[in-house]
Image (spheres, coloured by chain):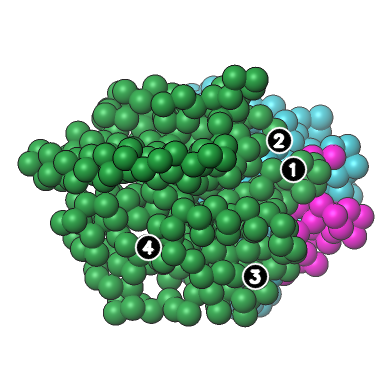
Chain colours: A cyan, B green
Amino acid sequence: MTTALKPRATREAYGEALLELGRLHEDVVALDADLAGSTMSKLFAARYPERFFNVGVAEANMMSIAAGLAVGGKVPYASTFAVFATGRAFDQVRQGIAQPRLKARICASHGGITVGEDGCSHQSVEDVGLMRILPHMKVVVPADYNQMYAAVMESYEHPGPVYIRSGRSKVPFVYREIPAALGGGADVLKEGTDISIIACGIMVAKALEAADILQKRDISAEVVNVSILKPIDVDTVAASLAKTGCAVTAEEHSIIGGLADAVSEVATEYCPVRIGRLGIRDVFGKSGTPEELLEEFHLTSEHLAGLAGQVLNRSS
Amino acid sequence: MTNFRGDHPEAVIPQDILNLEKTANLLRQDVIRMTAAAASGHPGGSLSSADIVAALYFQVMNHRPAEPKWPQRDRFILSKGHCAPVLYAALARSGYFPAEDLLNLRKIDCHLQGHPDMHKTTGVEISSGSLGQGLSISIGMALATRLDSLPGHIFTLLGDGESQEGQVWEAAMAAAQYRLDNLTAIIDVNGLQIDGHTRDVMNVEPLAAKYEAFGWTSRDIDGHDLEQVIDSLQWSRTVAGPVAIVARTVKGKGVSFMENEAGWHGKAPSPEQERQALAELNAQAEALAGEPAEASN
């Protein structure tokens, strides 16, 4: 079950954690590309204007400036929408940040389709794949406000580059409190024996709901929240696959390049089992309200429970 | 040659013009030997920028080869990363690593990568190779330096062909917006790029006027006249806001058959061509050796 706390957007946690990092560490600097009000870096900008750099609508420039700041001993947090952070500025991230293993943080908001009405140009369903493929890049997709806050706070210490994805829309709380750390990045939120539901981001809350639905059908689902998609917690994921013998993955991202692939990679090497994949099925997004889009693309707890049932039937 | 000051063994001795001419000649010979040994690499733009690079490493910049991360140092950013040979030659000749490494350029076990890698090669400030990003990275370094109240100046070398990358102009906007006093861009305008004359492929001129329009101070100079090069680089330290030095150069400078030939952008000399190129450069060096040394310095 998710908690009764009023849902909040993960990007709000980014803004508030960044502000706290700014208070704690003088070497934290932040950058944005004319979206400070949306990514919530505006909180840091208002408090620490001398350490905030708005580069205007120039994401490529922003990523390279962040690289230079990192070389100069700062810990830069660069934010914009996920689609621009990873697509528009891919080469700048690749050459300037990932390859030199710089301590730069890319904190992208508006991941996935719950961006809503703005449509496919602003909905990133490829960002996790683009970042996951880059050597040295750590990829984090927190499940709720509390986990996002923890992810941003602990990112300060990470010696290399980090990509952290947040979302525009409010999501239910999965964690009652801000966790001390993300640990290995795979939390077994509910134990089960029949099937593993492995989810990330906004789909974690829906995975818990799907487990409840399945429970009513006498199916015991284990729910695993993978918040660190790279490097993925192989032991926890493989142990769950071995225990249940089958799985479904759930993500607000293309089933190519994201969580489905990350879990499949673990399965292929360590524990080959049948895996159903819930996500965006090789298409771009479209306009609509976030709720309509989640229904359109089958990113609901009902569809997740249904897919789990199908995978179980095929596996038995 | 003697590189280091006796009273300050970690600091490079600033050279006078005549010695800089000789050093630039040496860097050019290194570029020829390195690319010939590697049987690949980019001699053309390395030769056109040799005087600028020599002036920076052996006269203008405060740096300590024995202490590469000295916080007070000036920094050189090679935005046109394919001209790595001349950077490596300058680093080796100023004492960052042994000169014999140069002949292992691009070899599987050597730290000298085809394009600069900050983690492999001592003295390389940032990895580069994909064009158009160095000026933005320099802005980040200049901002960090300013935040820390450090004295270091950032010198960034770009190509004229590279100036076709849109990100260069994003950076030009930003450097003026942030009023970076500690940033100098040097554009090595050798007029040629891989597919031909820059003016024919995609004209970038007027460069000085473009930078002025973006809010920079600029100066057009002869990039092979070391007095002009040094004077401009030193002057750029004193100017408020970012400075663009548009250096007019000859691609392949110093080797007759390479000069003004786009084909020598990314092609290594054969052993025979290497011999001829070194003979020409040696003759130039001997001519310099006959010159009386200047009294100053």
Q: Distance between the Cα atoms at labels 1 and 4?
A: 30 Å
Mark 4, residue position: B249
Label 3 is found on which chain of the structure?
A: B
Classify 10 Å Cα crowding around label 4: few (below 14), some (14-19), many (20 and above).
many
Label 1 is found on which chain of the structure?
A: B
Classify 10 Å Cα crowding around label 1: few (below 14), some (14-19), many (20 and above).
some
Labels 2 and 4: the sequence-earlier one: 2
Q: What amino acid is found at the position of numbered circle 1 in the picture? A: Pro
Label 2 is found on which chain of the structure?
A: B
Q: Distance between the Cα atoms at labels 2 and 4?
A: 31 Å
Residue B142 horizontal/vertical position (percent): 69, 51
Disc 1 with disc 4 on a shared chain: yes
Query: The C terminus of chain B is located in which quarter?
Result: top right
Label 4 is found on which chain of the structure?
A: B
Residue A45 horizontal/vertical position (percent): 85, 58
Labels 1 and 4: the sequence-earlier one: 1
Q: Which mark is residue B72?
A: 2
Labels 1 and 2: the sequence-earlier one: 2
Q: Are marks 2 and 4 in contact (CB under 8 Å)?
A: no
Q: Which stretch is magenta? A: A26-55
Is B271 rendered above or below residue B190? above
Q: Say if residue B95 shows up in the picture.
A: yes
Disc 1 with disc 2 on a shared chain: yes
Does the segment drawn in magenta span residue A43?
yes
Q: Are marks 3 and 4 in contact (CB under 8 Å)?
A: no
Q: Residue at x 30, y 76 (%)?
A: B201
Is B82 rendered above or below residue A153? below
Residue B21 horizontal/vertical position (percent): 40, 45
Labels 3 and 4: the sequence-earlier one: 3
Q: Distance between the Cα atoms at labels 1 and 2?
A: 6 Å
Q: Say if residue A252 shows up in the picture.
A: no
Mark 3, residue position: B217
